[in-house]
C-alpha cells in the first residue's frame, strides 16, 4: 500500500511561497499557523482510495500486528451471529460484499474485525482461520469480544460492516472512499460530508487523471429503513442547487468566484439527504440553466461528454452534467437536475435515462438558482425505474400515491408518427402499454381539440404561446439573478462586467427589449392554455389520478454531433410538444424504451443511440407515473439501462 499524506495547509502554502518560505514562516513563530489534516489518498492493490480525516469509531486498545510497522491498515468489519465461525461462512460474506459494493476489495481482508451478535459463547471451527489465511492472505483477526469499540459519545454505538482503515497506533477507524476519475467531464468536483449537515470539496486526486476525482463511500455502511429509504444511495447535484459548505456556480466562472460557500442547503436537496442519500459531487449545468449546445456555446466550462453511441453526441442541456454522469458511471445512482423548458427531458432523451419534469410547485425551490420561478421544476435522473420511483416518492412526498392506472393511452396526432426511423418502436411501446393497462390507444388531434375548446377570441396555440417562454425566463432571470449578479460583480471589480456565455446573453438582451408588461401577459397566456389542458385534455380521476396518459416521442436515435458549428444563438420562441408540460404544469416523464443503430461519422462504424418516450398525465399524478413505470419494468415491457456506449 502506498500512502501519500496530504496536509492541506502545507500544500497550499508551498504552492504560493515554495518550501523555503514555508520553513521561514513557521520558524518566525507566527502564532496563527495551524495545520489541518485533510485526509489521505492511498492505492490498495491497484485501486485508489481516500481516507477522510473523520474518525468514525475507535478500538478501546491499540493493536499490534507482527510484521507491520506503519500506522493505517485496511481492514474489514464483518458481523455474524453464528456461534461457530466457519471458513464457508466467511466465503459467503466476502462474496456478498463483492456483489453489493464497489469499494470493498480483497485488499481489505488483511485484517478482519468480527462483530459477534449471537448469544452463545462463540468459537472458531477447527481449521477455519488457516483456510481463510490461505485463501485471502488475512493476517489479523480481531473480535468484538477481545477488542471493544470505544463507548465515547463522539462515535455512534454501532460500527457498520464493510471496509475501513484502522490506525494501529491509536485504534482510530476511518471510512474508505473509492476514488474514480470523471472521464466524461461531467462533474465540477467530488464532495465529502464535513459535518452532519455540511459538505466540502473532496481533497483527493486519482493518479494520472486530468479531470475531477469523485469519491464514494462503501455501500455496506448503509441500511435502508422506513425513515431512510435512500440510505447510501449516491447522488450528484446540479450546480444550481445550494449545498451547505459548497459554492453554487451556475456554470459561470465569475459567479463561482464572486460568491462565498453557501450556509444553507436547499430544502429540496435536504429532503433527499434526510432520506439517506450520499451527495458525492456537484455536476455541471449549462450557464444559468439556459439551453446550450457544445462546443461554441460552452465558453466558460467544457460541455460534458454523453457516453452513448460514439461518445461525441450532444448531452443536451441544461442538466448536461447530471445526464452524462448518470449514463456513464455505474458508481453513481441518481442525479438531480431541473427542467424549465426541457432541461431534464432533453438530457434524459439524449443520454438514454429515466428523467422527469414533475408537476410544477411540488418541491420548494428556495436556495436554487431560478431560470423562471413560474416554470422551474426539480427532476431526478435514474437508470432503474425502481430506484427512480423510490426517490420520486421521497422528493414529491406531498402528492397522493395512486396505484391504479388510467386505461386511456393518448397519442397526439401532431407529434406522433412523424415518420421517424424509430416510429415502429414507439408504436410497439404504445400498444404494449395499452395492453398492460387493459385499455386502448386513442388518437387526439390537438389542433381540433384546441379550436373546439379554447376560450372565445383566441387564435392558434402558437400565437398564444410562441413568445411566452422566452419572455418569462428572460424577464424573471434578469430580475432575480442577472441584475444582482452584475451589481455585486461591479462592486467587487471596480465597475467591471462579468463574462457570460453567448446563449444567456442573447436571451437576456431579448428580455431587456420587451415592454414591462410582457411578463404578466405571458403568464396570462400560459394560464389560458393551462386551464384548457387541465379541464379538457388530462383530467383528474378519483381512482387513477389522471383520466389518461399522453405519449410523445422524446428521442429517436438520430445522431446530433457535438463537433458541429451551429448558428449564433437566437431566442427560444415557438411552440412544440415539449412545451405542453411547461405551460400546463403537468408531469412529463422520460422513459428509455430501446436503442437503434446509426452509422457514426466519428468512428466509421455502426453505433447505437437511445430511443425514449415521454409520458404526461394530469397535474399532481407524478407518483402514479413512477408506480406505473416501475411496474412496466417488472413486467419486462421496459428495462433498466446500463452505463456506457450502449444501454442494454
Ligand atoms: C388535425 O386536424 C386539422 C383540422 O381538421 C387537420 O387540418 C390536420 O391535418 C389534423 N392533423 C393531424 C396530424 O391529424
Ligand atoms: C399573448 O397572446 C396573444 C394572443 O392571444 C399574443 O398576441 C401575445 O403576443 C401573447 N403575449 C406574450 C407575451 O406571449
Ligand atoms: C451503415 O452503413 C452500411 C453501409 O453503407 C449500411 O449497409 C447500413 O445499413 C448502415 N446502417 C445504418 C443503421 O444506417
Image (cartoon, helix red, strand yellow):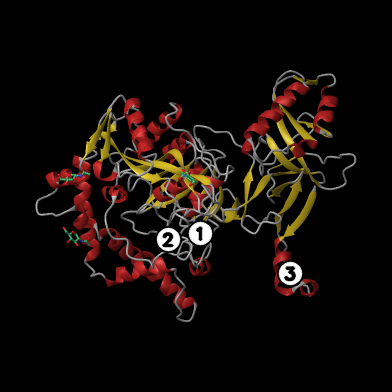
Q: Which label was assigned to residue 642?
A: none
Residue identifier under label 3: 14
Whole-percent x and y of residue 314? Answer: 47, 55
Q: Are marks 2 and 1 in contact (CB under 8 Å)?
A: yes
Q: Provide residue 239's location: percent of width, then percent of height.
A: 49, 57
Earlier sequence position, callout 1 versus callout 3? 3
SS for callout 1: loop
**Residue on which the image places disc 1:** 303
The residue carrying pointer 2 sits among few (fewer than 14), some (14 to 19) or many (20 or more) residues within 10 Å by Cα, namely: many
CB at disc 2 and ligand 2 closer than 8 Å: no
Which residue ends up furthest to the bottom in the rendered image?
A: 494
Q: Mark 2 sits on what residue?
A: 292
Callout count: 3
Where 372 falls versus 436 (above or below)?
A: below
Label 2 sits on a secondary structure element that is loop
Q: Secondary structure at mark 3?
A: helix
Q: Judge the density around disc 3: few (<14), some (14-19), many (≥20) Cα neighbours within 10 Å.
A: some
Q: CA distance from mark 3 to mark 2?
A: 39 Å
In the image, residue 414 above or below residue 648:
below
Amino acid at each position: 500500500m502506498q500512502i501519500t499524506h496530504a496536509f492541506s495547509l502545507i500544500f497550499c502554502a508551498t504552492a504560493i511561497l515554495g518550501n523555503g518560505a514555508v520553513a521561514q514562516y513557521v520558524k518566525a513563530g507566527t502564532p496563527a499557523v495551524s495545520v489541518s489534516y485533510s485526509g489521505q489518498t492511498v492505492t490498495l492493490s491497484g485501486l485508489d482510495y481516500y481516507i477522510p480525516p473523520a474518525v468514525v469509531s475507535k478500538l478501546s486498545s491499540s493493536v499490534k500486528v507482527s510484521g507491520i510497522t506503519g500506522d493505517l491498515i485496511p481492514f474489514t468489519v464483518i458481523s455474524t451471529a453464528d456461534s461457530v465461525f466457519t471458513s464457508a461462512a466467511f466465503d459467503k460474506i466476502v462474496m456478498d460484499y463483492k456483489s453489493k459494493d464497489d469499494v470493498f476489495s480483497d485488499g481489505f481482508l488483511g485484517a478482519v474485525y468480527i462483530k459477534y451478535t449471537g448469544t452463545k459463547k462463540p468459537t472458531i471451527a477447527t481449521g477455519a482461520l488457516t483456510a481463510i489465511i490461505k485463501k485471502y492472505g488475512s493476517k489479523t483477526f480481531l473480535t468484538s469480544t477481545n477488542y471493544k469499540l470505544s463507548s465515547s459519545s463522539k462515535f455512534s454505538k454501532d460500527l457498520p460492516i464493510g471496509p475501513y482503515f484502522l490506525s494501529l497506533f491509536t485504534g482510530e477507524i476511518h471510512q474508505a472512499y473509492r476514488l474514480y476519475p470523471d472521464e466524461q467531464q461531467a462533474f465540477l468536483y467530488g464532495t465529502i460530508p464535513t459535518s452532519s449537515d455540511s459538505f466540502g470539496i473532496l481533497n483527493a486526486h486519482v493518479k494520472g487523471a486530468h479531470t475531477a476525482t469523485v469519491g464514494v463511500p462503501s455501500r455496506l455502511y448503509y441500511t435502508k429503513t422506513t425513515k431512510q429509504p435512500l440510505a447510501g444511495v449516491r447522488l450528484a447535484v446540479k450546480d444550481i442547487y445550494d449545498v451547505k459548505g459548497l459554492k453554487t456556480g451556475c456554470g459561470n466562472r465569475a459567479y463561482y468566484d464572486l460568491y462565498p460557500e453557501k450556509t444553507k442547503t436547499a430544502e429540496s436537496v435536504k429532503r433527499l439527504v434526510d432520506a439517506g442519500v450520499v451527495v458525492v459531487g456537484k455536476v455541471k449545468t449549462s450557464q444559468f440553466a439556459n439551453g446550450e449546445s457544445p462546443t461554441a456555446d460552452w465558453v466558460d466550462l467544457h460541455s460534458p461528454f454523453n457516453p452513448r453511441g460514439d461518445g461525441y453526441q450532444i448531452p443536451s442541456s441544461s442538466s448536461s452534467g447530471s445526464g452524462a454522469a448518470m449514463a456513464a458511471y455505474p458508481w453513481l445512482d441518481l442525479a438531480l437536475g431541473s427542467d424549465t423548458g426541457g432541461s431534464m427531458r432533453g438530457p434524459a432523451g439524449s443520454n438514454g435515462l429515466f428523467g422527469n419534469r414533475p408537476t410544477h410547485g411540488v418541491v420548494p425551490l428556495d436556495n436554487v438558482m431560478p431560470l423562471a420561478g413560474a416554470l422551474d421544476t426539480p427532476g431526478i435522473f435514474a437508470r432503474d425505474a425502481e430506484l427512480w420511483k423510490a426517490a420520486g416518492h421521497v422528493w414529491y412526498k406531498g402528492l397522493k400515491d395512486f396505484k391504479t392506472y388510467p386505461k386511456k393511452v393518448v397519442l397526439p396526432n401532431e407529434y406522433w408518427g412523424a415518420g421517424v426511423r424509430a416510429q415502429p418502436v414507439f408504436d410497439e411501446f404504445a400498444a404494449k402499454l395499452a395492453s398492460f393497462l387493459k385499455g386502448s390507444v386513442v388518437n387526439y388531434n390537438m389542433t381540433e381539440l384546441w379550436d373546439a375548446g379554447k376560450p372565445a377570441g383566441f387564435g392558434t396555440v402558437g400565437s398564444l404561446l410562441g413568445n411566452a417562454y422566452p419572455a418569462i425566463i428572460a424577464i424573471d432571470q434578469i430580475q432575480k439573478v442577472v441584475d444582482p449578479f452584475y451589481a455585486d460583480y461591479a462592486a467587487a471589480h471596480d465597475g467591471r462586467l462579468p463574462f457570460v456565455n453567448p446563449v444567456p446573453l442573447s436571451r437576456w438582451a431579448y428580455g431587456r427589449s420587451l415592454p414591462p408588461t410582457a411578463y404578466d401577459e405571458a403568464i396570462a397566456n400560459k394560464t389560458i392554455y393551462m386551464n384548457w389542458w387541465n379541464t379538457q385534455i388530462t383530467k383528474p380521476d378519483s381512482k387513477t389520478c389522471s383520466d389518461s396518459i399522453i405519449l410523445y416521442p422524446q428521442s429517436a436515435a438520430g445522431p446530433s454531433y457535438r463537433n458541429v458549428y451551429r448558428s449564433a444563438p437566437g431566442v427560444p420562441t415557438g411552440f412544440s410538444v415539449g412545451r405542453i408540460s411547461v405551460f400546463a404544469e403537468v408531469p412529463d416523464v422520460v422513459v428509455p424504451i430501446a436503442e437503434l443503430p446509426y452509422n457514426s461519422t466519428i468512428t466509421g462504424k455502426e453505433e447505437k443511440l437511445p430511443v425514449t418516450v415521454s409520458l404526461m398525465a394530469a397535474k399532481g399524478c407524478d407518483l402514479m407515473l413512477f408506480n406505473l413505470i416501475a411496474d412496466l419494468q417488472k413486467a419486462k415491457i421496459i428495462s433498466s439501462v446500463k452505463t456506457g456506449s450502449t444501454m442494454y
